[in-house]
Image (spheres, helix red, strand yellow):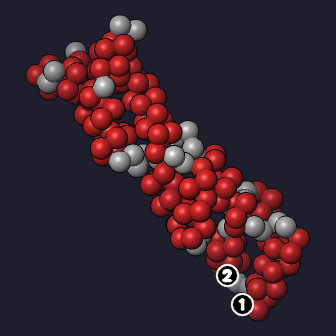
């Protein structure tokens, strides 16, 4: 029980993560189940609370798809994941998030392009806007945003025109 509480004191964990950690430490299955049941009864181990907290903390930085995959990797049930994401993410909000990140990254990549243009001969042949657009698209897709959102956001003149003047 001490190892389990110590692990939970460092960071929140799912039932699956804590069970795996205790197995790695060499505890027997019967002992692990008793400890996990006790921690659930005491309220220290709650997958539903964890899922809600996790999705809310990732809300501004990652897409729905990315958070869904991360939660799945942490051993949460598909039903719990879907229920949590339905309450946390909306399509319109995810699009706005994608737009905000694109604007921010457009500025960053524009500055980076200016700095590296002189040192890299390849950048002299590629148009600035195309190079920045590719970089921003790659970052957004890596964060798990749907491709349709990414191209819709990058087609938005608000992203590139307003930020080029800053």
Whole-percent x, y for residue 74 in the image: 58, 66
Other residues around mark 2 within 10 Å, as few (<14) / some (14–19) / many (≥20): few
Q: CB under 8 Å between callouts 2 and 1?
A: yes
Q: Residue at x 67, y 81 (%)?
A: 23
- Farthest residue, direction right: 42
Which of the numbered marks, if any, corresponds to residue 7? none
Residue 72 vs 31, above or below: the answer is: above
Q: Which residue is mark 1?
A: 29
The answer to whether any part of residue 119 appears in the image is no
The quadrant holding residue 131 is: top left
How many marks are shown on the rendered structure?
2
- Farthest residue, direction top: 165
Q: Which residue is mark 2?
A: 23
Q: Nearer the viewer, residue 6 or 19?
A: 19
Q: Secondary structure at mark 2?
A: helix
- Considering the image in quadrants, where does the C terminus appear? top left
Residue 122 left/right relative to 41:
left
Whole-percent x, y for residue 133 in the image: 26, 29
């Amino acid at each position: 029980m001490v190892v389990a509480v110590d692990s939970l004191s460092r960071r929140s964990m799912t039932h699956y993560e804590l069970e795996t950690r205790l197995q790695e430490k060499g505890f027997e299955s019967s002992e692990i189940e008793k400890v996990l049941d006790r921690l659930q009864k005491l309220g220290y181990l709650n997958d539903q609370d964890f899922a809600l907290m996790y999705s809310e903390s990732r809300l501004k930085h990652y897409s729905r798809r990315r958070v869904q995959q991360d939660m799945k990797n942490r051993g949460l049930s598909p039903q719990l994941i879907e229920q949590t994401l339905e309450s946390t993410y909306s399509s319109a909000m995810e699009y706005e998030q994608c737009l905000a990140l694109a604007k921010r990254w457009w500025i960053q990549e524009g500055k980076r392009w200016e700095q590296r243009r002189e040192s890299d001969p390849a950048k002299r042949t590629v148009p600035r806007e195309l190079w920045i657009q590719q970089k921003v698209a790659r970052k957004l897709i890596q964060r798990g945003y749907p491709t349709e959102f990414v191209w819709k956001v990058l087609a938005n003149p608000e992203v590139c025109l307003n930020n080029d003047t800053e």
